[in-house]
């Protein structure tokens, strides 16, 4: 749009020149007087006033004190820095996505087959899915988590909704609890969501954004680099009754530390005594141990014990469908005569919330996962693909521990193999992490978490020697 001053120049008429002849002596041209005057018109004054008004400094409804510049997401900032690094020795141990032996993304062979089936299907289209998603996916996803013969499914106690991966499932669950979970009989008093310390960073803002207060329970023991089980139990025992407890079903992110089966049972007993509400986040089923049933055992234990609970489920890691955003949210009611009615009501409200959020979930990733989960041969092949990924990560854990112990790197390194899943909390401090990045072009989060999938037989020696060097140097500086 042209500036106001330009509009003014274009719209304003040229000054009007008025000539008057005063004849003092009609017969003498020498006595003729010519007077010229210039006058400003009223429309011009109005345009000038409009121009002055438009030229006033423009203000915003969103000044910096109201909308400050947000910090860059640490993980995606790390990825950006890695990409810009031109060193041939650089190693990306940051964002959690599986990489093969050549540090490349791996499209699962079974996913390629499902993709081929979709492309060759003459009935394939891009129509909207129902609000709750692809039924052939959500039903099998529930079986995957709870077990194909789970009584909860047979009794109609499960409501499942397809979501925007695990993040969307956590959000939908948080939104539902914020709206409908009123354990204290006072709608203004929201229940607190307890998160492990540490947890996946996104958990904090997901629940805060829907108005749920958050708190922490101890989880990682920095001395043992294992589970602070005593601290965790004490926190759950002291939390207000009927609090929401978020639990990582397996392959805890970011620590890689999981409770043992016996510890899970103790956790369940404490939560039952306090009336706490379990919120499971499962993003690594089958990816952690290579065994789908083992990785779902904690959730199944709580369901068997009669808990009412919810589950956020992601297919990003175990199907390699990172960018397709395929996931599910499951509500499981406790056993009772009116459980099917409760489940139906919950399902109706979940659909209503979903409709106002995304209307319909995306179709492609859902179709891929559904095809695999519903075809026995492809399902068996998928389990082999899972064992390939989890097996390579387990091999890297063993190799890294062996190399650090061979080098005599100060400290103990058994936690590398004690932990499970994609991530390992190395125990490296922020100073050591910074030196690894500056001197060796190794990229990891500043809390010392590494993605084991970023290691391979071609870079693990280099990484182990780099860790050995920075641990010794930083240790000497503090002596």
Image: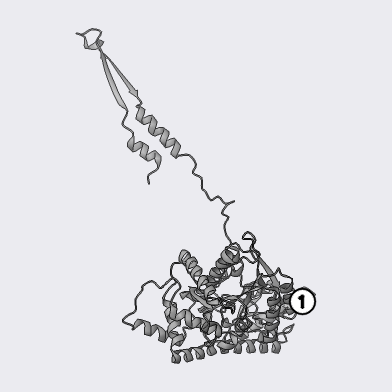
Q: How is the image coloured?
A: one colour
In-front residue for pair 193/42: 193
Q: Going by the picture, which residue comes out furthest to the left?
A: 27
Task: Count neighbours of disc 1 (C-alpha within 10 A) and say few if under 14, some if 14 to 19, many if 20 or more.
Answer: few
Q: Secondary structure at mark 1?
A: helix
Residue 432: x, y in percent?
69, 74
Q: Is residue 161 left or right of residue 435?
A: left
Quadrant for residue 332, please give it. bottom right
Question: On the image, which quarter does residue 252 sit in?
Answer: bottom right
Q: Is residue 50 above or below residue 361?
A: above
Q: Is residue 419 visible?
A: yes
Quick one: quadrant of the C terminus? Answer: bottom right
Of residues 212 and 12, which is closer to you in this image?
A: 212
Count of marks, rendered view: 1
In this view, the residue in front, 369 or 460, is 369
Res. 289 in view: no
Question: Could you say where residue 178 lies in the image, as x and y percent from the top left?
Answer: 58, 64
Drawn side of residue 14 relative to residue 5, left or right: left
| Residue 368 or residue 417, whichever sits in front | 368
Estimate the x, y position of residue 85 in percent, counting from the top left. Answer: 55, 72
* Residue 314 in picture, x, y percent from top left: 53, 77
**Extreme residue toward the right, this view:** 479
Residue labelled with disc 1: 476
Apparent side of residue 273 relative to residue 113 in the rendered image (left or right) = right
Q: Residue at x 22, y 12 (%)?
A: 29
Seen in the picture, residue 359 relative to 273 is either above or below; the reply is above
């Amino acid at each position: 749009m042209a500036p106001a001053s330009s509009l003014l120049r274009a719209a304003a008429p040229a000054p009007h020149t008025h000539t008057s002849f005063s004849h003092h002596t009609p017969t003498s041209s020498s006595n003729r007087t010519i007077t010229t005057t210039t006058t400003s018109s009223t429309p011009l004054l109005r345009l000038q006033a409009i121009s002055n008004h438009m030229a006033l400094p423009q203000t915003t409804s969103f000044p910096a004190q109201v909308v400050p510049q947000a910090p860059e997401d640490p993980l995606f900032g790390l990825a950006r820095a890695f990409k810009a690094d031109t060193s041939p020795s650089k190693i990306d141990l940051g964002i959690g996505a599986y990489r093969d032996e050549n540090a490349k993304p791996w499209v699962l062979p079974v996913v390629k087959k499902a993709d081929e089936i979709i492309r060759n299907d003459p009935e394939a289209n891009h129509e909207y899915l129902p609000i709750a998603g692809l039924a052939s996916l959500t039903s099998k996803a529930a079986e995957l988590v709870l077990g194909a013969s789970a009584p909860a499914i047979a009794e109609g106690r499960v409501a499942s909704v397809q979501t925007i991966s695990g993040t969307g499932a956590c959000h939908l669950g948080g939104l539902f609890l914020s709206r409908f979970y009123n354990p204290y009989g006072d709608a203004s008093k929201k229940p607190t969501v307890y998160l492990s310390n540490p947890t996946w960073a996104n958990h904090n803002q997901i629940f805060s954004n829907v108005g749920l207060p958050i708190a922490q329970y101890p989880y990682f023991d920095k001395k043992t680099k294992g589970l602070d089980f005593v601290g965790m139990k004490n926190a759950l025992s002291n939390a207000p009754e009927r609090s929401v407890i978020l639990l990582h079903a397996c392959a805890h992110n970011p620590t890689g530390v999981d409770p043992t089966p016996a510890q899970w049972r103790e956790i369940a007993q404490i939560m039952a005594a306090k009336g706490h509400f379990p919120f499971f986040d499962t993003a690594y089923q089958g990816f952690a141990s290579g065994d789908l049933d083992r990785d779902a055992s904690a959730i199944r234990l709580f369901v068997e014990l009669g808990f009412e609970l919810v589950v956020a489920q992601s297919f990003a890691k175990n199907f390699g469908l990172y960018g397709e955003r395929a996931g599910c949210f499951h509500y499981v009611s406790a056993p009772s005569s009116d459980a099917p009615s409760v489940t139906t009501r919950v399902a109706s409200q979940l659909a209503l919330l979903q409709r106002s959020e995304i209307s319909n979930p995306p179709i492609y990733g859902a179709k891929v996962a559904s095809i695999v989960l519903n075809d026995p041969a492809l399902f068996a092949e998928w389990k082999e693909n899972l064992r390939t990924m989890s097996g390579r990560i387990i091999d890297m854990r063993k190799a890294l521990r062996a190399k650090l112990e061979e080098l005599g790197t100060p400290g103990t390194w058994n936690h590398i193999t004690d932990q499970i899943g994609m991530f390992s909390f190395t125990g490296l401090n922020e100073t050591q992490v910074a030196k690894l990045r500056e001197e060796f072009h190794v990229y990891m989060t500043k809390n010392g978490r590494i993605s084991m999938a970023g290691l391979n037989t071609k870079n693990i020696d280099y990484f182990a020697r780099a860790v050995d060097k920075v641990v010794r140097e930083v240790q000497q500086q503090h002596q």
